[in-house]
Image: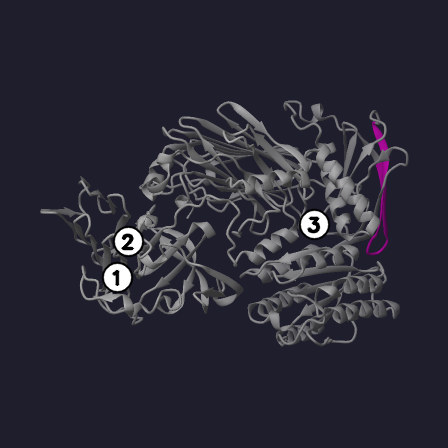
Amino acid sequence: MSGLQGVRLLLLWGSACLWLPGLAQGALVISGDHEAPQETRGAARSLQKRSTNEAKVEVYSVKVDCTVTSRFAHTVMTSKARNKANIPQEIFFEMELPKTAFIANFSMEIDGQVYVGEVKEKEKAKKQYEKAVSSGQTAGLVKASGRKMEKFSVSVNIAAESNVTFILTYEELLQRKLGQYEILTRVKPKQRVQDFQIVTNIYEPQGISYVEAHATFLSNELLPLVEKVVTDNKAHISFSPTMEEQRKCPDCDGTLIDGDFVIKYDVNRAKSLGDIQIVNGYFVHFFAPPDLPRVPKNVVFVIDRSGSMSGRKIQQTRQALLAILKDLHEEDHFALIPFDSYVEFWRKSLTKATKENVAEAMTYVRGIRDRGSTNMNDALLRGAEMLVKDRQEKKLPERSVDMIILLTDGMPDGGRSQLPIIQENMRSAIGGNMSLFCLGFGNDVDYSFLDVMSKQNKGVARRIFEGSDADIQLQGFYEEVANPLLSEVDLRYPENTVDFLTTNHYSQLFNGSEIVVAGRLMENDLDNFMVEVFGQGFEEDFRVQGQASAVDWDVIYPDEEYIFGDFTERLWAYLTIQQLLEKSKSGAPDEKTNATAKALEMSLKYSFVTPLTSMVVTKPETEDGTDSPLIADKLTEEQRQQAERVSYRYLPPSYSYQAPPTYFVDGDPHFMIELPDRDDALCFNINDMPGTIFNLVRDPEQGILVNGETIGDKKIPPDGKINTYFWRFGIIHQTLGVRLEVSTQDISVLQGSKRVKLLWSGTASFKGPNMDLLLTKDRSLTVTLKDSVKFVVLLHKVWKKHPYHRDYLGFYTLDSHLLSPSVHGLLGQFYHGIEYEVSDLRPGEVPEKPDATMYVKGQELNVTRGWQRDFRRDVKNGENVPCWFIHSNGTGLIDGEAADYIVSGLFKTV
């Protein structure tokens, strides 16, 4: 629906090197005088005007340039657009970047003048944001975007025949998971671009073991366009299709560039000490020794089976547990503790993972059913006590790793007041002797509570997103921790030579992961120093030491103009801030305060947008004397979750300008009410006998009437369901003396004494004193009534020899706000808005289409999230538009019943 929202152009793309309403605490805001001149408002906000102007905004360059140096990724996104129209236009710049990244800079160049961002303390920036919002200026919003990404959105009004350049820079340390690093670039340009480039250069002095590149949108024809050049310690990957190569199909103008471009790689690991790099007075140590035997693990699965886990959640939990049990190694030990109001044990102590025991456990898992409440406290304590008891009784291997994996979707019994008690109970019971991993399923769980409790007990928390792949997510997390290699790992460096060291003690090192430690050298001219690593392995203690020396980058990369020479310092700063932010949540009270203050200080020093800072770009004062700040914030995981919790309540966004909605009926017949002010849509279907005539629009004050007649399939299909479509529309404007009959065969126009007949097989333009017509051959008819509403009728032609289907029409209403308050009809009743709220999202019959409860017109309806096709841009295929589907012919949403809108003739009101 983005193409409907204002005179603007969406530049959609993102890189990783839910649709959500915006929250004030996480906003990328552009505010100021973005009003278009008076002549572009009002009726000019129609789709036709927008489409015309949109074509006059040219996006001529989209570039993603990513440089990865020793796992530290520096990404620059640049987009350039030109307003070719003779009026100002609003341009939207939207991009997606990883939630683990910190924005380092954002700038805009408008008419040769550059506006550069400055990182400020969040509270100071917030005052500017509130000032901008309170003055009624427009605002773009930062939103979470799925599981890994965040979407940033900026709008700016560009003068006629002017250019604008947007540049976003962000940085992150790539994490090694399951033996590889991943660089994800999300690209959604929405149109073909003259200069489109994705370029990634990877510099790894250790040597690169492999590089893979693929994309979700790559066809066999596009695959050769991915250029990959790999040497021992450098990789260059690029993708730069021409305008023609971007074309979606030979006969259409859309782009096929829509999806994820993914690069995966790993480095050589010949040394057990790891790789140490010293550059410009800072060092970084990467530790992931090769060929270590795995350490046996003792894992207790604590499984929430309370009533809220009913349906798909408990089913997916069972599926994931069955797969996990299969992957246990025979030397592992495991236990199963399902809980609801009561805590249940499969067996009273941990069991060795023999084939027989695993088979019995799988039978038990298949019988787990949801019931009762959420006695999480007792379940976790029983799990910790079981591990402690079995360890004391020497039932577990001496050299093995103890862990608890909790899966829950809700709040523990006792509510929020119970959370600190459970955290303290677990910290006391575990006593630093085991790890607690918490998996939070869905949005009802208190993720912050799980996150802190995990960090307090040498573990991590992970969100499991509701969806058809939730069981895959559970298995994926388990795979990350399934194979411990070392425990109690210490990385040591000479005293009095290093300060400001990041965390250098880790409870575990898992296969496929990597430990990273960075610090500052106290002597800048230090060429080498001794490094030691200690850990507990499977059969014996692990100990290795060696000399580290500075890397001469000019020797390793003699032909490169190295533009990222301070990467070790920025990597150190990034890692330090991340760890300080964690400590500010889970540390002791004094630690929290000190960690927060230090993280803020470093965020400001290194110009990182973190949860403690915001980036502000201030443009010159506008004519009314107000400045126009742009503010970029960073979402925390808790804010992302909160956004998702309210996403189905459809609270109105905080910005003032909203594009007018569009209403249409197209298909079977499917009615769509588009609501851009809520970034949402409602839809319903009408099922009746072929030949039924419905009133769609009736405005007695203006004398406007629109009726539509349905037609059925040629014969009854094998499934017995007759599909009906609109094949004929009657349109009357009594005041203007206009009468049209539009069918799948032809168009008849009667205006005064003049009668005109047009055929779909030709293109025609008709301009009269009270009405304009624009006919596009075999495609569309646009009807513009003087000083009033505009209608668009689309023709859908079906293969003549199709055994069932016939040609049919779609009907779209534009500029509906120009009609009177008394307008009604199946579509007309929604022209002046509809108030509703959606909550209680739950699994539906189809995994991809959840159900929810809608409160509308004093009624409570069961609705389903689905899709309807909007065919205005692509008559043949259409675009999928998400909407809430109201069942039973729209009952509860429409006034009265569908039968109340049946009329006796194409130009009748009753």
Q: Name the N-terminal-most of marks 2 and 1.
A: 1
User: Is 842 situated above or below 45?
Assistant: below
| Residue picked out by circle 2 | 811
Mark 1 or mark 3, which is nearer the start of the sequence?
A: 3
Q: Name the main secondary structure of what is drawn in magenta.
A: strand
Count of picture labels: 3
- Where residue 87 appears, as percent x and y from the top left, is 38, 30
Dots 2, 1 in contact, CB < 8 A: no
Q: CA distance from mark 2 to mark 1?
A: 12 Å
Decide: is 137 above or below 850: above
Which of the two marks, 2 or 3, is nearer to us in this view? Answer: 2
Per the rendered image, the range of residues in magenta is 527-546
Residue closest to the far left? 753
Picture coordinates of residue 109, whole percent (x, y) = 52, 27
From the image, tell me which residue sits under label 1. 695
Quarter of the C terminus within the rendering = bottom left
Residue bearing mark 3: 512
Q: Tell whether position 533 is magenta.
A: yes
Q: Give the residue type that dot 2 points to.
A: Phe
Which residue is nearer to you in this view: 94 or 846?
94
- 22 falls in the magenta region: no
